Amino acid sequence: MQTSVGNHTAAIDQISTGVDGLKAEYVMRASASGVVGGAVIGADAGDGRGVGVQR
């Protein structure tokens, strides 16, 4: 989703993926006038890392 007024733009992106029942990831990113923030939540049973949150 994206919205703009004049020179100002704000956007929100969401991506979710799964691979072979072993890996899942959800990515959320928000940006407003060039400032970007977001989070990644994932689980990877293939390497024993379990669930992680990244910001």
Image: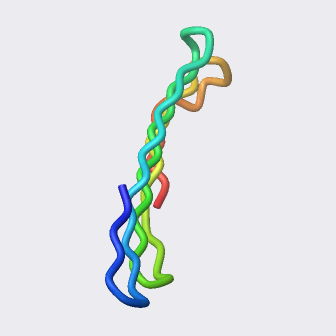
- Please identify the quarter of the rendering in which residue 26 is found: top left
Residue at the top extreme of this rendering: 20
Colouring style = rainbow
Residue 39 coordinates in the image, percent (x, y): 43, 55
Given residues 6 and 23, the one toward you in this image is: 6
Residue at the front extreme of this rendering: 6
> Image height check: is 26 above or below 31?
above
Residue 46 coordinates in the image, percent (x, y): 65, 18
Dividing the image into 4 quarters, which one contains the N terminus? Answer: bottom left
> Image height check: is 49 above or below 35?
above
Left or right placement of residue 48 versus residue 55 in this view: right
Total residue callouts: 0
Left or right placement of residue 40 versus residue 19 in this view: left
Residue visible at 47% across and 74% down?
36
Residue at the bottom extreme of this rendering: 7
Residue visible at 42% across and 45% down?
14
Residue 33 coordinates in the image, percent (x, y): 43, 84
> Image height check: is 28 above or below 47?
below
Residue visible at 67% across and 24% down?
47
Residue visible at 54% across and 21% down?
18
Residue 2 coordinates in the image, percent (x, y): 38, 62
